[in-house]
Amino acid sequence: MNWHHGVSSAGRVLVALVIALVLVSIAFQTGGYSATGTWSAVLTGAVTGPGSLEATLRYALPLAFIAIGVTVSFRGGFFNAGAQGQFYAGGIVSLYLALVLPASMGGTLVAFVALIAGAFAGALWSIIPGILRIFFNVDEVIGTLMFSFIAIYLVTYVSTGPLKSPTAGGQVAVTRSVPAAVRVTPSSGLSVEMVVAVLLVGIVVWWLLHRTRFGFEIGLVGRNPIMAEVQGVEIRRIGLATFAVTGFTAGLAGAVEVLGPVGNILSGYDPNIGLTAILVALVGVLAVSGALVAAVLFGGLTAASLYLPLAIGLPSTSLVFMTGLISMLVTARLGWGKWPQRVWHGGDRRSKALHDWGESKPLQTGNAGTKLEPITLDRPGSVGSRA
Amino acid sequence: MSGTVRVGMDVAGRPVARDIESTVLGCSDLRVEFGPVVALDDVSLRWVDRGKIHAVVGQNGAGKTTLCRVIAGMTRATQGTVEVEGVSYPAGDAQRVRRAGVELVHQTFALPPHFTVAEALQLFQPTQARGGLYSKRKIEQLWAGRLEEFGFHVLPTSWVRDLSPEQRQAVEITRALSSGSRIIVLDEPTAVLPPEAIAGLFDRLRELVMNGITFLVVMHKLRQVRAVADTVAVLAGGRVVLHPTSMAAITDEEIARLIMDVQSSGSVTSASAIAMGLGAGVDDPGQVHVDMAGVDALHKTEEADVPVPLGAAIPQASALPATVEGLGGDGHIDDIVHGTTTKRVEPSERRHFALQVEEVSTPSSEGRHGLQAFSVTVKVGETVGIAGVEGNGQQALVDTVVGLLPYRSGRILLSEVDVGNLRISARRRIGLRYIPADRQSRAVSLSNSLWVNAMAAQVSSGYGTSGAVRRGYLSERKLRRKGEDRLRQWQVRYSSRDQAMRELSGGNLQRVVLAREVDDNAGLIVAEQPTQGLDLGGTELVWAALRRAASSGAGILLVSSDLDELFALSDRIVVALDGEAIEELYPPYDREVLGRAMVAGVTSS
């Protein structure tokens, strides 16, 4: 939206971050760790330490890819919660292609084809629950989550079955490794190409959202699907497209991980990126730029959480607490409703990214709603006081 | 409950017994602010008579609903107190005001749709069964009795979602009364009712008043105020401009002047009078015919010289289509109302029909009638009214024409193009425009910005965005500017085009809808209850806009439950009953004939 909205939502996220920081500090202090010591260790682990910044960006990369796509779905009012499964689908397909395509094609071309195929696999994995949602009214949260479970078992299947590495030990089932020529990043997980790729995806999605009819219509559908339909929006088409975009970026993230730092698929491979990316999208207040910034923040926390056990003996899960707290505080309303003018302007402020994005609309009359049930969240009585 | 003497408390929580024993309901020094907007400003009102119907009137945005909500404790006041039965309470304490015996019946209904009537009523009871256990049969018996006692005919076993508006209202009133309240605040109770149900509501209110219940009623139409109220108070711009005054002591003309309370030029003519339910006649036989039977008492208002904010109501000349002449921004409102200075587009220049609905049938759903071989045509430049008791197929007609509801058999043509089951966007490109009755869900997106709302249909359906949208790519900058142009043209009062829609008041919101739906390329405008809940100025604007659209070549399908509106605008009226078009009426219209046709399908002819 325009600049002052952007500033106000950024301000609110900052306030939430500060509150989270204070609360976590208190937790550290009462747990017997020095808060300042811990934070300086976090800073070292995420930014200033040798290789820290690279680690931060490495973990931010897949989060950014997925969160950008999730932003599209959520803006359209479709709560695609299955990024994890789409990530796996992308990873599996790209790994398969990386292994079977002839080396004579050249590593770069194979990698390119595998990445794109992975992205499309993710899109397909997302569109199936999307079709179930749009044509059969199957709740998309349940549908996408269930498809994630199917994908988890597919991971186990490929790593123990068709793509199983013949050289792996008996204890661990793992697939064959991606040939070095096809790898898109060194083992650090960071390459210029991939950073450019994520920025490119960000720019394209931003452009889609703000410079095309498609994006305009996503904004209408997400806020009030019935109104959108009356204006002539094809809600089903928009819905399917948002599912596809989310799946595409999640599949791309999976492909980048597998062709990049991971290099193979381990049975039980669970980087838990899909759900974290949903938090990233929400903390980024459903804006593309916000998603990028939030991805770096969460990437930094992930990098730091790996460093903390080494540096000060704090378990890496201690920062999971911080992640959760930030997400809760950013998506909570933080009592802004206390002041009348805040209530009056309630619709404008995106503190609770999801809720503010939707709006309440009691459908009393007729048949418009029977085509597609409204999917936005109900937000009763924020104004209601007009005479 | 009401018989017991209560000790109230003042703002600081101390018991207080002020010398206002005779006040049944009142408020002192109320001030309510919503951000920069002052909704109520230093409002002090005092109603003394028990067992009476007290009316509060005023324009949209005058603060009526806010007053109701503050009195019932639903909205916090910046300052001021509320007095109930001579005891004052801090404004905004719903629990205590409720215990003191005041209940609010909301403008929009607040009953859970998936409950039965008995369950919904039981839900709101202050005292609940021990252990929270209920017998379905017992509560059904209890509420059947209560509903009967209050004179409402609603089955306690029916689902709330299946009830008609008047039945829902009956349940709401029953809920309010059964908590033992003696003072009921009704916020625009007639706005949601079909016209034929209003008399019934008034009968119930009168009966309840006999039992000592006091009503505070917000209303828009003076005719209704005259019909039912004992006293009237007027709010304008958040201030009291008339303290509760006996209806016997004031004329409608005086009330109308107070409602407008605007320092402006121009004069209100019969059009305004009709808008306010005064039912005056209009001279031009081609345009408006209002039957005077039953409203003769109000004749004297015909020539009333009531000021109206003309400049604020009508878009400037630059906004008018080229075919309309002589409608300057400061033109006399008569010109617009009577259309005397407008020039009709020659039929030969355009297609003949704007809409042809030929024997269309749709399935019925949940207590609403589908269409049964329904036929209606709207010629270019013609306004056809659809009259009927709510639920007789009007919704299905609108939805099939707009494209929200597929039809089983028959044919629909827009501008002589068979739309088959064409998508809404394609129909809009042919020239379909739609002003929905359900503004908050169908017409606007409350959390979206003004410019998005003003341009949503054009962008989504692909028309009228020249330069701003090209092959799916849009220039947000140009689109914002186009949206803002439209907002300006329709004189929407706003502070920023990026402002959220929900910040606008009812009349202003409808202007945004008009800005989107009324343009030069409109072929057929489906106007569904276009002035429901609007004040005089808003009604004027909508009527003028529809008349102008018709005179510049659009057909208008007007679905309205407001008979005055149908009479004022329609060249023909088609009566819908049980999903069939049973009758076609021509001017001069007769209120009684139409009424009979609506309920029974028989006319006097």
Image: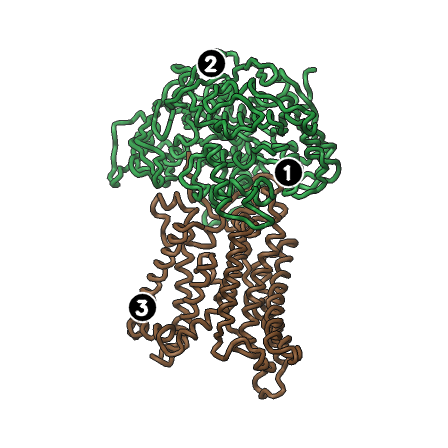
Chain colours: A brown, B green
Rate crowding at label 1 as few (under 14), some (14 to 19) or many (20 or more) other CA atoms within 10 Å.
many
Tag shown at residue B301: 2
Mark 1 to mark 3: distance in Å? 59 Å
Looking at the picture, which amino acid does disc 3 mark?
Answer: Ser
Rate crowding at label 3 as few (under 14), some (14 to 19) or many (20 or more) other CA atoms within 10 Å.
some
Which residue is the site of mark 1? B402
Say whether mark 3 and mark 1 are on the same chain.
no
Question: As rendered, which of B469 and B354 lies closer to the eye?
Answer: B469
Mark 2 to mark 1: distance in Å? 39 Å
| Residue B123 in view (yes/no) | no
Tag nearer the camera, 2 or 1 = 1
Which residue is the site of mark 3? A25
- Chain on which label 3 sits: A
What's the residue at 62%, 80% (across, down)? A160
Say whether mark 2 and mark 3 are on the same chain.
no
Tag nearer the camera, 1 or 3 = 1
Residue B428: give x, y in percent of width and height: 63, 39
Pointers 2 and 1 in contact (C-beta within 8 Å): no
| SS for dot 1 | helix
Question: As rendered, which of A311 and B80 lies closer to the eye?
Answer: A311
- Chain on which label 2 sits: B
Total marks shown come to 3
- Position of the C terminus of chain A, as image quadrant, is top left
| Circle nearer the N terminus (2, 1) | 2
Quick check: B490 above or below B303?
Answer: below
What's the residue at 29%, 74% (across, down)? A37
What's the residue at 38%, 52% (across, down)? A8
Looking at the picture, which amino acid does disc 1 mark?
Answer: Val
Looking at the picture, which amino acid does disc 2 mark?
Answer: Thr
